[in-house]
Image: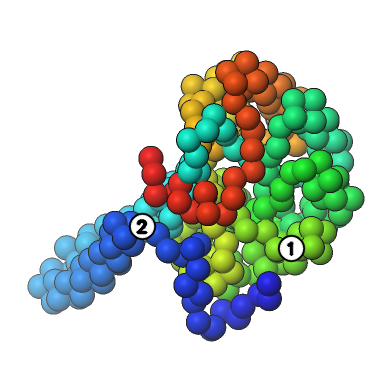
């Protein structure tokens, strides 16, 4: 699938068709913001401090929408997928890693579980063999930007979003043979200006039903518990099993082992949902 220029027409694909309620709500937010902006200009003639307060309020809303992980305020992020079966979707962020990724793949194979690896394009470019190993194991890869700039990503303009996404897509497409269909921003950020960039590339933004918070918690049981309490059909779980924590340990991999064991015990399967299942599931709570 060729990458589209920023000034090209937006594709009317399933990736940018939210439910009617979501779409109307999003439009209402944008038009309301414009109306408030015009109102602030009018108020400025009477009271400049009041006008400034109104403008700060508008910017604070968009700031919140940009910095809230997994936010669906302005972007239709999928937080579950559509299924009635006892199925969950394992998603892993921030790989690949030459030391940790093989261990993750071995553990998944032991439990006959499948997962989607949201890969950093720059790391995938350094380790193309690992990307091939992930795919050979029956798993999928997805776009997690090229540089994973977790400090400034929320403030990028559309052109910078496009460069980050396109370069990562090129790397993953070279390894997989087909472009990725799913995207997750660093820290789960999906700012308002990102939405049309994703639409033009037919990328569905994916969040999570539950995350382990494994970067800051070194207790595998607690990390696993945050996921397992949300074990239900269509749940999306997010972990970082290819990364070591601040102590230099991979407690996330230990947590993943607990999660996989309990998923097996509960009679669930770890599957790769279809694009249609994810776009449908994002409208559900």
Residue highlighted by disc 2? 19
Name the secondary structure under disc 2. Answer: loop
Quadrant of image for the C terminus: top left
Number of labelled discs? Answer: 2
How busy is the neighbourhood of tag 1: few (under 14 within 10 Å), some, or many (20 plus)?
Answer: few
Residue 232 placement (x, y as % from top left): 49, 28
Q: Earlier in the sequence, mark 2 or mark 1?
A: 2
The residue depicted at 60 percent of the width and 55 percent of the height is 182
Residue nearest the observer in this picture, 39 or 207: 207
Asked which quadrant contains residue 23, the reply is bottom left
Quick check: 269 left or right of 18?
right
Res 44 visible: no
What separation in Å lies between label 2 and label 1 (alpha carbons)? 27 Å
| Residue that badge 1 annotates | 178
Q: Check residue 283 in the rendering and tell me which mark sits there, or answer none.
A: none
Residue 88: give x, y in percent of width and height: 57, 34
Relative image position of residue 83 (x, y in whole percent): 50, 39
Is residue 230 among what the camera can see? Answer: yes
Query: Which residue appears at 36% of the width and 57% of the height?
Result: 19
Label 1 residue SS: loop
Left or right for 69, reference 35:
right
Label 2, residues with CA under 10 Å away: few <14, some 14-19, many ≥20: some
| Circles 2, 1 touching at the beta carbon (< 8 Å) | no
- Residue 111: image quadrant is top right
Q: Quick one: quadrant of the N terminus?
A: bottom right
Please tell me which residue is depicted at 62% across the width and 16% down the height of the picture. Answer: 265
Q: Position of residue 188 (x, y in %)?
A: 54, 47
């Amino acid at each position: 699938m060729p990458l589209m220029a920023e000034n090209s027409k937006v594709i009317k694909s399933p990736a940018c068709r939210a439910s009617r309620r979501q779409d109307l709500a999003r439009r209402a937010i944008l038009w309301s913001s414009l109306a408030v902006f015009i109102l602030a200009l009018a108020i400025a003639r009477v009271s400049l401090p009041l006008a400034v307060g109104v403008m700060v309020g508008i910017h604070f809303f968009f700031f919140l929408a940009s910095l809230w992980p997994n936010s669906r305020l302005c972007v239709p992020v999928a937080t579950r997928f559509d299924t009635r079966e006892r199925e969950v979707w394992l998603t892993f962020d921030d790989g690949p890693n030459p030391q940790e990724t093989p261990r993750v793949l071995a553990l998944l194979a032991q439990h006959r579980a499948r997962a989607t690896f949201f890969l950093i394009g720059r790391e995938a470019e350094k380790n193309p063999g690992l990307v091939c190993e992930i795919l050979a194991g029956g798993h999928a890869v997805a776009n997690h930007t090229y540089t994973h700039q977790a400090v400034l990503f929320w403030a990028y303009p559309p052109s910078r979003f496009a460069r980050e996404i396109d370069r990562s897509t090129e790397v993953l497409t070279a390894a997989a043979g087909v472009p990725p269909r799913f995207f997750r921003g660093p820290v789960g950020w999906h700012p308002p200006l990102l939405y049309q960039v994703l639409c033009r590339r037919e990328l569905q933004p994916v969040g999570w039903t539950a995350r382990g918070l494994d970067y800051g918690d070194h207790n595998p049981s607690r990390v696993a518990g945050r996921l397992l309490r949300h074990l239900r059909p269509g749940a999306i779980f997010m972990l970082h099993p290819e990364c070591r924590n601040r102590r230099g340990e991979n407690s996330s991999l230990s947590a993943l082992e607990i999660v996989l064991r309990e998923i097996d015990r509960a009679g669930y399967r770890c599957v790769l949902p279809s694009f249609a299942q994810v776009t449908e599931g994002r409208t559900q709570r």
